[in-house]
Image (cartoon, grey):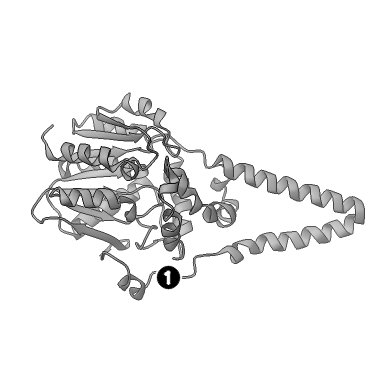
Amino acid sequence: MKKLQITILCAVLFFLVVLATVALILGQIAAFTLLAVAGIALASFPLILEPEKTSLSHEMRSHAPGKFVHLPEGFVHYEIGGPENTQVVVLIHGFSIPYYVWDPIFEALKISGFRVLRYDLFGRGHSDRPKAKYERKFFVQQLDDLLNGLEIAEPVNLVGLSTGAAVASDFTTVWPTRVDKLVCIAPHHAATNISLLDVPILGEYLAAVFFGPSLPQRQIEYFYRPERFPEMPVRFREQMKYKGFRRALLSTLRNFVNQDQLEIFKQVSKLNKPVLLIWGKEDKIVPFSGNERLLSVLEAEFLEVDKAGHLAYYERPEVVSPRLVDFLRHDS
């Protein structure tokens, strides 16, 4: 967010300097004319940059991988694999990257004999983008509806990444009998300052012109060695063409990401559930130093992953996957 603020400030200062210079040279009338032209140009930027030109139709869904289930708030894109009639593990992704972010873990858990379910949160991937308040309880309700829709009645294991870890933890406190074990990977726990994006109208404009377009390239920030994953920005852009994506993310920033989540982790500790915390030491998204704050209220096993960023399991599967499988497989 700091980079976005600096970019906006520099652009505004540059514009003011240019306007002042023109005013001195040509006079006030010319300056006002320039201001009007500049205003029209600025207002047209969102239309010029708009990538969301496609609706998520039945035809679009028919070409997507995985499956779809219709829930009260709309269609949800999901994939389920592994042996039937075995322990179910549900993977909940984070703020913006849809279910492909779980590729390494999904395959590792299937091979290890688990029944694995991953899905796109509303507003992401190929799931619908309902006009709703994208707060934590909205995503908790989506998970409840999904499990009911797929007729998964037995207790499940939840694995959540970043904001997905807060969703998984909240679900556990609401329906403790439906959760066996909980895994939190680089959990979002502290409020993020979203600055001008929180201002109505202005926030929408900035999301369209600056924040949204910057998201694909910012995927490199999720890794310690981003050069190993050059495909990530390209994969991310796919979901951006569907209408409602940016609106959903902005709503999530305003109603979820900008709020402190520590209390929900305190509540999890009271349930005495087995919890595994996984964190990459080079995490730039949710800094590794936050583990001290989290572990002050959450009783958990802790796996620290060297030479790994936000997606520690993606960069270091040889370290994370065996520990995750062992945790889920054995009684605690």
Q: Quadrant of the N terminus?
A: top right
x then y, percent, for residue 209: 59, 56
Label 1 packing within 10 angstroms: few (<14), some (14-19), many (20+): some
Q: Is residue 326 visible?
A: yes
In the image, is 315 to the left or to the right of 49?
A: left
In the image, is 138 to the left or to the right of 105?
A: right
- What residue occupies the far left of the structure in this picture? 85
Type of the residue with mark 1: Ser
Q: Quadrant of residue 27?
A: bottom right
x then y, percent, for residue 322: 20, 39
121 and 200: which one is in front? 121
x then y, percent, for residue 137: 33, 47
Q: Secondary structure at mark 1?
A: loop
Q: Quadrant of the C terminus?
A: top left
**Residue at the spot 49% in from the left edge and 66% down from the top edge:** 52
x then y, percent, for residue 122: 36, 57
Mark 1 — residue? 55
**Residue at the spot 16% in from the left edge and 37% down from the top edge:** 326
187 and 27: which one is in front? 187
- What residue occupies the far front of the structure in this picture? 228
**Residue at the spot 30% in from the left edge and 30% down from the top edge:** 266
Q: Is residue 173 visible?
A: no
Does 19 appear above or below 191? below
In the image, is 56 to the left or to the right of 113?
A: right
Does 18 appear above or below 312? below
